Amino acid sequence: MLDNKLKTPFIALIGAVALMASAPAFAQNAAPAAPAASSSAAPAADASAAPAAPAAPAPDAGLPPQMQHAGHINIGTMFIDAKPVVKVVMVGLVLASIFSWTLLITKLIEFRSLNRASDNFLEAFRGAKSINDMGRIASSEEFEGNPLADMAAAAAAEVELSRQAGLQVGGEHRETTLGRVQAAVGAVQASLTRRLSSGMQFLASVGSNGPFIGLFGTVYGIMDSFIGISNTNTTNLAVVAPGIAEALLATGLGLFAAIPSVIFYNYFQTRISAYGARTEGFVAELMNAISRQLDKGA
């Protein structure tokens, strides 16, 4: 028999060993209950979570107008969605371009008819036998409005006015008469310069300022696009591309208006200079013809 002092610890040790031996069996009996509990809880969780799913927002909801056509933009939609300032720039540039092309067609027709009429007048003028014949040919309806005919008519009219005033047009007064004739012809030349140069200032203005006007619209449009990026908190290129595209359209229109204007301006300046040289040659021919007639007393 064990002593009473050892009996109590020994009994406690036996109880602990028995408890450890029975723990696995208890765990096996309790384990199947857990899957059942979890399987029963899962449908309940799914059932409670399903109604709480939020509805998907519309793809374009909350976007600025210029960003709502991402993926299907064209020139029409870019113009419609543009800001009023950019629209004004675009419309102004389109109108300037239309006016430039209209001016081109008008001046091409003008120069073509001008050179043809001048050729016909020179042929008739060189057949004149007197100063009166020069005036009659130049004043005919066939050559009405032709600059060379106007010069010849002004020269003949000045000689006739001097005669009607009782002045001597030949002899020692020949140089005085030629001086008055030269002044009359110069007045016609000045009006010719103004006539041929009409519209050139507009072409020069559009050619030099068109790109800057378009650039102003581009800067304003891109600035608005960056504001839209800030408001939508997105840097997706498909979202911000329409606003940037409409801004670049303004620059494109500026170049579309400016490039033809510069070409037309240089072309017509060349034509004006060429016709000016032709009038200078005719003035010399006219003064020689009048001088000969004055010497002949015609």
Image: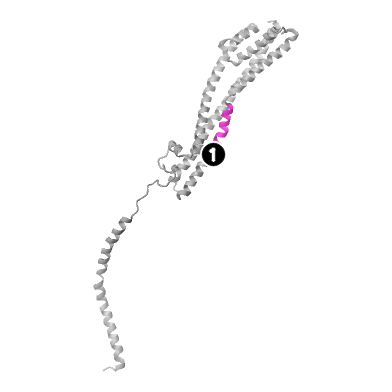
Q: Measured along the vertical axis of the image, is residue 166 above or below residue 242?
A: above
Q: Is residue 28 left or right of residue 226?
A: left
Write the residue at 47% across / 40% down: 245
The mark total stands at 1
Q: Is residue 38 left or right of residue 272?
A: left
- Quadrant of the drawing holding the N terminus: bottom left
Q: Position of residue 221 (x, y in %)?
A: 50, 41
Q: Measured along the vertical axis of the image, is residue 273 above or below residue 135?
A: below
How would you classify the magenta stretch by its main secondary structure? helix
Q: Nearer the viewer, residue 187 or 182?
A: 187
Q: Measured along the vertical axis of the image, is residue 226 above or below residue 270?
A: below
* Magenta stretch holds residue 220: no
Q: Residue furthest right?
A: 172
Write the residue at 66% across / 12% down: 155
Q: Residue 200, located in which quarter of the rendered image? A: top right
Residue at label 1? 216
* Magenta stretch holds residue 209: yes
The segment highlighted magenta reads 200-213
Under mark 1, the amino acid is Phe
Q: Position of residue 158 (x, y in %)?
A: 67, 11
Q: Position of residue 148 (x, y in %)?
A: 61, 15
Q: Nearer the viewer, residue 99 or 204?
A: 99
- Label 1 environment density (alpha carbons within 10 Å; few <14, some 14–19, many ≥20): some
